[in-house]
Image (cartoon, rainbow, N blue to C red):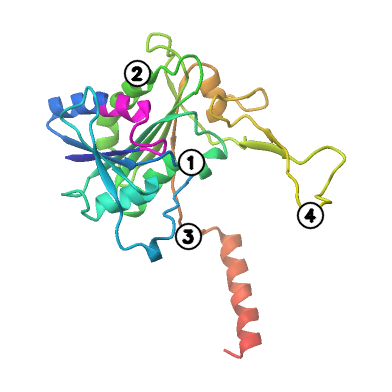
């Protein structure tokens, strides 16, 4: 099996190095092949964006060496994480991958930050292209023990390979040593957001022609903020309690809820009346 590793922190980030080393060693023993295609620059918060591809005819790349993983071919690409995945899947770097790993992101991707994460956006893009994937993120505090997240990711790979097609998992790991990690739990995506409030008290809207809007961060920040208002099975609360959180996620899909379908049918009826169709 050919496995692609990408991220959104950039090809030179320590997190992708840790993941490439750990997965590279595992892959050698299991008879798999690993390669890296990741952004040349930090593209955090890019979600599944690809940029203005309509005006692009080519993408610049640079060969990159990952210390400790000589068996892993690595490239930096002038592209967002999702476009790195698309380019690799479409044959830009040789035979296409059969599995996509993204990370290790410096900072958790829990709650509403899942929507904005370039780390998660990469594996959601892989799913749209028919591949399973694992996004890996580490709480950004306490010395950044990437080895814990790398070991956790490798431990999940056999199960991911045996999971149903188009399995897309989001793994968040607390900033503890491997020995201190309490275990892993199934996490529910909480309602926690990156931005808790915008604007200043007493100033409900901008009054000048130019200025700035203040932001107050919520709990779904890289270091993981206060999760005291989350349920015990929410992803952020799980990480805060010392466990890794694993969540199965999915990307764009039709909303087949009966109420949503009824609303669409009513909209089409109004449309037909207006346009005589």
Q: Which mark is residue 117?
A: 1
Crowding at label 3, few (<14), some or many (≥20) Cα neighbours within 10 Å? few
Q: Name the residue under label 3.
A: 254
Of 273 and 53, the residue lying toward us: 53
Of 166 and 44, the residue lying toward us: 44
From the image, state whether disc 4 or disc 2 is nearer to you: 4
Q: In which quarter of the image is the C terminus?
A: bottom right
Q: In the rendered image of this protein, does residue 127 appear above or below residue 20?
A: below
Q: Name the residue under label 2.
A: 147
Q: Give the range drawn in magenta.
A: 7-20
Q: Determine whether the residue tagged by mark 1 lies in a helix, strand or loop.
A: loop
Crowding at label 2, few (<14), some or many (≥20) Cα neighbours within 10 Å? many
Q: In the rendered image of this protein, does residue 189 appear above or below residue 223?
A: below
Q: In the rendered image of this protein, does residue 171 appear above or below residue 53?
A: above
Crowding at label 4, few (<14), some or many (≥20) Cα neighbours within 10 Å? few
Q: Mark 4 points at which residue?
A: 209
Which of the marked residues, 4 or 2, is nearer the chain's N terminus? 2
């Amino acid at each position: 099996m050919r496995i692609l590793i990408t991220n959104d922190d950039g090809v030179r980030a320590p997190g992708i190095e840790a993941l490439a080393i750990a997965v590279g060693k595992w892959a050698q023993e299991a008879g798999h092949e690993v390669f890296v295609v990741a952004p040349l620059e930090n593209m955090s918060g890019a979600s599944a964006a690809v940029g203005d591809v309509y005006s692009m005819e080519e993408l610049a790349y640079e060969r990159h060496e990952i210390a400790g993983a000589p068996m892993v071919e690595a490239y930096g690409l002038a592209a967002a994480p999702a476009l790195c995945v698309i380019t690799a899947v479409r044959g830009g770097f040789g035979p296409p991958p059969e599995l996509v790993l993204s990370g290790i992101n410096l900072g958790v991707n829990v709650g509403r930050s899942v929507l904005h994460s370039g780390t998660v956006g990469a594996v959601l893009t892989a799913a749209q292209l028919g591949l399973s994937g694992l996004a890996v993120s580490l709480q950004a505090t306490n010395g950044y023990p990437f080895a814990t997240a790398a070991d956790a990711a490798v431990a999940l790979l056999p199960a991911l390979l045996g999971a149903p097609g188009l399995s897309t998992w989001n793994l968040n790991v607390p900033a503890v040593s491997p020995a201190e990690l309490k275990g892993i739990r199934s996490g529910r995506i909480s309602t926690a957001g990156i931005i808790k409030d915008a604007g200043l008290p007493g100033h409900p809207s901008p009054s000048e022609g130019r200025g700035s809007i203040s932001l107050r961060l919520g709990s779904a920040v890289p270091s993981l903020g206060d999760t005291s208002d989350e349920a015990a099975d929410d992803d952020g609360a799980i990480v805060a309690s010392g466990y890794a959180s694993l969540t199965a996620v999915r990307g764009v899909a039709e909303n087949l809820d009966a109420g949503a379908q009824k609303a669409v049918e009513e909209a089409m009826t109004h449309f037909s009346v207006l346009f005589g169709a």
